[in-house]
Amino acid sequence: MALSLMSLNAQAQVYNYDVNNDGEINVLDVTLLVDRILGGESTPILLPLTFSADQQPYEHPDGPAYGRRKTQETTIATLKEFYVNYTYDKYPGFGIYSAPELRTFWAVDEGTGQGRWLVGDGNTPGNGYWPSGADASVDVTFYAYANVDINNLSSDHNAMFFCDGNTGQTNNGKVDKPYIHFILDENGPETKDLLVAKKADNWNHCKGHIFFHFEHACAAVQFFLVKTPKLANVDVMVKKAILYNVKNDGNYFFNEGWKDVKHYDEDERMKYTLWDGVDAFHPVPDATEDKSEMWQLTTSTQAESDYFFFIPQDFPSWTITSPINETTTGSYIELDCQITPKDGSKGYEGKAYIPFSTNSLTNGFEMGKAYPAVVRMGTSMVKANGEKIFNTDGTIK
């Protein structure tokens, strides 16, 4: 039997004894060949499929001077599942893509204590196979994404996979523009840090093992709040901070990056809560260049690795001379605050507004980068009607 296999293996290319087209001649090929000779039905070929992954950490655009570091929000060590779609050309010019059915999850072997990614779900763990329609020599491109909610496929879904439209067909049937339609959901913090990866290979080359190098598709931002020197003679307490006019809808193309970034609902544009003390006010510190002494808008016990996530975008600031209303297009921060002069004179309690912009950044908040955003409370703060709260010397009007 061994000699027969060696002979078959040596002549595989001539006589095509590699029945399952996996690049090798083995007992399975012999069994299938005998089955064909005897006129039996061919056994379905189920080629194994396994995944592994690592991750590109966020980087600060200022480089080493700021100290590049990984975030702790989502890492391969904390990731518990991700989803995979795929495309391939079974025949020239004919493209196929899957529904989000290849679900993976992290499992630890009870005997060895070793963890690994399983393809499948809780009901069918490990039952992952190479796409049955793709021969072992055909390249398949796999698209992986994590931290999304694909269980709700209504109009309020968080993310869905497409290929150049709902049908996935273009250029005479060839799929060439796979993308994820992603909606930022403020109410689901576990869905914000979108991870993406792409890998193409054929089974003959990789033997069914696909390695994903995940990247962060969003931008990560830390917000800090301080008073400018002009407000040194007042105490400021803040109960709530909200960032207005955040674009929360976009398409991430695996081959081209982000496109079509916009407001999901133009008539009700997203407002993003940065801080909510409920009924408790928090003091705002005086101006400082040391971020460790600034008030970071976070409730995390690991503040240095706590970020807000945004679809990459530019924030144009609101023109501070105009009143705020539903047509205001610029970005700004609303503060629910108490302002108390230290000399006992008249104070102010209510809403205060500060323009917010990314004008200092060439391309706004970019994919895969982490930023510190320092919001400085000064005499330019206004009420909703555009009236200033302070005189130029820092006294309250």
Image (tube, rainbow, N blue to C red):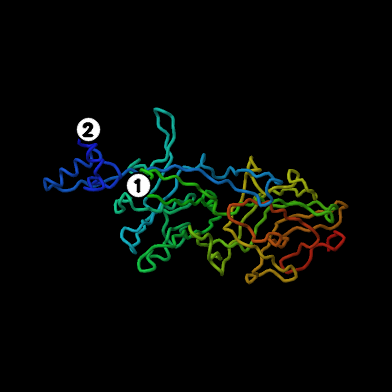
> Which mark is on residue 342?
none
Percent of width and height locating residue 135: 30, 51
Res. 275 in view: no
The residue tagged 1 is 203
What is the C-alpha distance between the residues marked 1 and 2?
25 Å
Q: Residue at x 70, y 57 (%)?
A: 335
* Nearest the eye: 160 or 130: 130
> Which mark is on residue 2?
2
| 380 relative position to 55: left or right | right
Q: Which amino acid lies under the numbered mark 2 shown in the image of this protein? A: Ala
Q: Residue at x 53, y 50 (%)?
A: 215
Is 125 situated above or below 194? above
Q: Residues within 10 Å of mark 1 (few under 14, many from 20)?
A: many
Percent of width and height locating residue 12: 25, 45
Classify residue 323 by image quadrant. bottom right
- CB under 8 Å between callouts 1 and 2? no
Number of labelled discs?
A: 2
| 224 relative position to 156: left or right | right
Q: Secondary structure at mark 1?
A: helix
Classify residue 392 by image quadrant. bottom right
Percent of width and height locating residue 375: 72, 55
Q: Which amino acid lies under the numbered mark 1 shown in the image of this protein? A: Trp
| 311 relative position to 374: left or right | left
Q: Which mark sits nearer the N-terminus, 1 or 2?
A: 2
Q: Residues within 10 Å of mark 2 (few under 14, many from 20)?
A: few
Quadrant where the C terminus lies? bottom right
Q: Residue at x 45, y 47 (%)?
A: 82
